[in-house]
């Protein structure tokens, strides 16, 4: 048994490997929900880079942060680093979260087999050369397993690499992950409203684990309308055309109450 297979066995002890056809169908279905959920599968061509290159090559990470800074119109590397990290968090979390909620499958993404490439419009395509999944037989452990796959497996190494290149608060980065997760829940609720309850339940469990604990509050002011308030700021308001985001901790209380009210369907106010 190779190191990768051994690690999967430990991570998903007690789970049943899913048939490859079921895994591919689940990923294809989730990818159709929207850009943040897309995950390509198969051979990679020129222009694609292994995710692990960002962990080990400070020069590559600096270049990517510089590209984001230019697009955002900011001279602050920490602003660009924050937005880049949040984009990666959204793209790495959403397909796996969607598959768990919509299909009861835990998708395994090994960072050595995940590839990315830059795109001028800021979209961050992801592709994996191998795909495995596990059937969920113990729903109570879904959040723990998903957390271990995404946070220690994919995002902690990236966060550590970012902090080597740019001085940025760890709490800000993990607040970005929480915000990305909340955005995933909202996207699912819009496109697959029947999944809202399950998505909210899983997200709340994730937000109570490890580095995501105390990063923010995920509420539901009206059925089917998730609302998140984070305890940090992603710094986007410091970009050229930036603003305070809808979940920003820096928003004044009146603005936050207004956002909460807008989260409630108009029919509830009629």
Image (tube, helix red, strand yellow):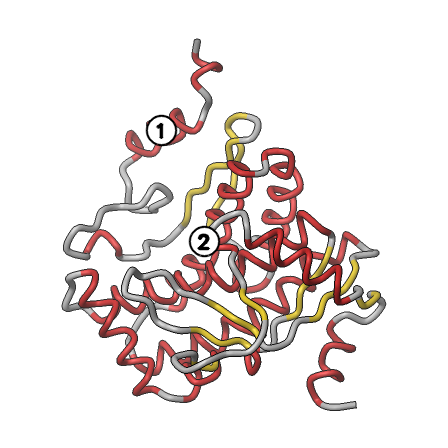
Tag 2's secondary structure? Answer: helix
> What residue sits 26% from the left and 55% below the top?
236
Tag 1's secondary structure? Answer: helix
Image coordinates of residue 44 in percent, x first then y, are 50, 78
Image coordinates of residue 215 in percent, x first then y, are 47, 54
Indicate which label's residue lies in the foreground, 1 or 2: 2
Front-lying residue, 37 or 62: 37
Front-lying residue, 171 or 196: 196
The residue singled out by tag 1 in the image is 257
Horizontal side of 257 relative to 98 (left or right) equals left
163 lies above or below 197:
below
Count all numbered tags in the image, as a single digit. 2
Image coordinates of residue 204 in percent, x first then y, are 60, 47
> What residue sits 26% from the left and 46% below the top?
244
> Can residue 13 be seen at all in this image of the molecule?
yes
Image coordinates of residue 188 in percent, x first then y, are 55, 43
Front-lying residue, 162 or 108: 108
91 lies above or below 10:
above
> What residue sits 32% from the left and 54% below the top?
233
Horizontal side of 239 relative to 104 (left or right) equals left
Quarter occupied by the N terminus: bottom right
Q: Tell me the tag on residue 35.
A: 2
Quarter occupied by the C terminus: top left
Q: Residue 12 appears in which quarter of the rendering?
A: bottom right
State which tag comes first along the sequence, 1 or 2.
2
Q: CA distance from mark 1 to mark 2?
A: 29 Å
> Can residue 171 be seen at all in this image of the molecule?
no
> What residue sits 53% from the left and 25% below the top?
222
Badges 1 and 2: C-beta atoms under 8 Å apart? Answer: no
């Amino acid at each position: 048994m190779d190191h990768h297979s051994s690690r999967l066995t430990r991570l998903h002890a007690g789970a049943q490997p899913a048939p490859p056809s079921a895994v591919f169908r689940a990923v294809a279905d989730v990818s159709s929900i929207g850009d943040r959920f897309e995950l390509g599968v198969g051979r990679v061509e020129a222009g694609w880079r292994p995710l692990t290159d960002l962990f080990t090559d400070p020069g590559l990470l600096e270049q990517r942060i510089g590209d984001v800074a230019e697009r955002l119109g900011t001279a602050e590397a920490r602003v660009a680093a924050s937005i880049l990290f949040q984009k990666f968090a959204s793209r790495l979390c959403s397909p796996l979260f969607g598959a768990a909620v919509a299909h009861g499958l835990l998708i395994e993404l090994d960072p050595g087999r995940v590839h990315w490439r830059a795109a001028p419009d800021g979209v961050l395509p992801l592709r994996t050369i191998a795909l495995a999944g596990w059937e969920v037989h113990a729903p109570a452990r879904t959040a723990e397993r998903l957390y271990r796959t995404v946070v220690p497996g994919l995002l902690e190494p990236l966060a550590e690499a970012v902090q080597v290149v740019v001085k940025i608060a760890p709490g800000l980065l993990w607040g970005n992950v929480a915000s990305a997760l909340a955005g995933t829940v909202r996207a699912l609720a819009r496109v697959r409203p029947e999944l809202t309850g399950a998505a909210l339940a899983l997200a709340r469990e994730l937000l109570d684990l490890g580095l995501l604990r105390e990063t923010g509050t995920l509420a539901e002011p009206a059925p089917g309308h998730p609302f998140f308030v984070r305890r940090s700021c992603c710094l986007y308001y410091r970009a050229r055309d930036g603003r305070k985001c809808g979940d920003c901790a820096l928003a004044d209380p009146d603005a936050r109450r207004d956002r909460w009210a807008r989260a409630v369907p108009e029919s509830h106010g009629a």
